[in-house]
Image (tube, rainbow, N blue to C red):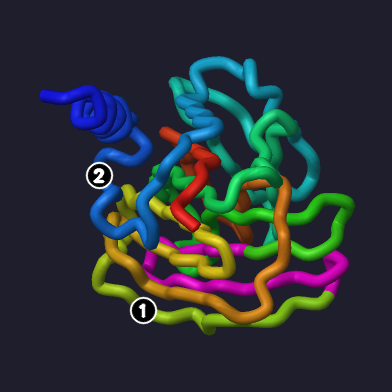
Amino acid sequence: MNFLKSLLFCFSISFFMNPIFAQYVSDLDQTPINIMDVYTENFTDNTKKWDLFDDNISEFAMENGMLLFWGKKDDVSSIYAPSLVINPSASSYLFEVKTSWVSGDDSAGFGLGWDAGEKSSRYQFYMTACGFYEFEVWENDSTNFVLTEWTPSPFINPRGTNILRVQNTGTSIKLAINGHILESETEGLKEMKYVFLGADGVQKVAFDDFRLANYETEK
């Protein structure tokens, strides 16, 4: 094995052993050439400094290695960790979270999203425990534009555990549940910075195994 083959072999081994890419490498838009940052969160402690809170609308708390959401009113809530950011130098990013619906209103939404900070533009990719998903964008934290209406999906495990994933490569976003691509968006996408988890309504939801990776792809 010559030097070039050895180098490529070592890169491929280190790349495929990276857990955030191992099960999804086959459907990436382009081949990653540099993994810049990988963040993982199993919610065993709060070293990432998630902004946990308990108010009259909802509560976010860590318990038994999970991030738990309790909705007290029919309202919306979200939670951030300032250290988990989309690297502006990266041409691509990928993030995902495992969700488990526990109880309450199974038609209320929950999932993940990403925004530009300072209550400007943000995207939300939410699902419901009764088997629907939605993709929407908010402008200035007040006006929302639904890109995909609530749509049923056979890939959702109703009232159970599901993995939501967002993959961005350049000007393209792919949304997936349990490894199945549901949507692809390419028009009018904005530059985002922060990733968040969120939920609506009166329900209890658990989040676990959050991952975020920033990476470069071939031009």
Determine whether the residue tagged by mark 2 lies in a helix, strand or loop: loop
CB within 8 Å, label 2 to label 1 = no
Disc 1 residue type (three-letter) = Pro
97 lies above or below 36: below
User: Which label sits on residue 23?
Assistant: 2
Question: In terms of depth relative to the viewer, which is nearer, 187 or 1?
Answer: 1
Disc 2 residue type (three-letter) = Gln
- Magenta range: 124-142
Looking at the rendering, which quadrant does residue 89 occupy? top right
Whole-percent x, y for residue 77 in the image: 70, 52
Residue drawn at x 48%, y 28% as measured from the top left: 40
User: Which label sits on residue 152?
Assistant: 1
25 lies above or below 52: below
Which numbered disc, 2 or 1, marks the residue closer to the eye?
A: 2
Whole-percent x, y for residue 31 in the image: 36, 51
Residue 47 appears in the picture as rendered: yes
User: Which label sits on residue 51?
Assistant: none
Task: Categorize mark 1 by other alpha carbons within 10 Å: few (<14), some (14-19), many (20+).
Answer: some
Quadrant where the N terminus is found in the figure = top left
Give the side of residue 149 with respect to residue 101, left or right: right
Whole-percent x, y for residue 28 in the image: 35, 57
Q: Main secondary structure of the magenta part?
A: strand
Question: In terms of depth relative to the viewer, which is nearer, 87 or 80?
Answer: 87
Q: CA distance from mark 2 to mark 1?
A: 24 Å
Whole-percent x, y for residue 166 in the image: 48, 56
Question: In terms of depth relative to the viewer, which is nearer, 155 or 104?
Answer: 155
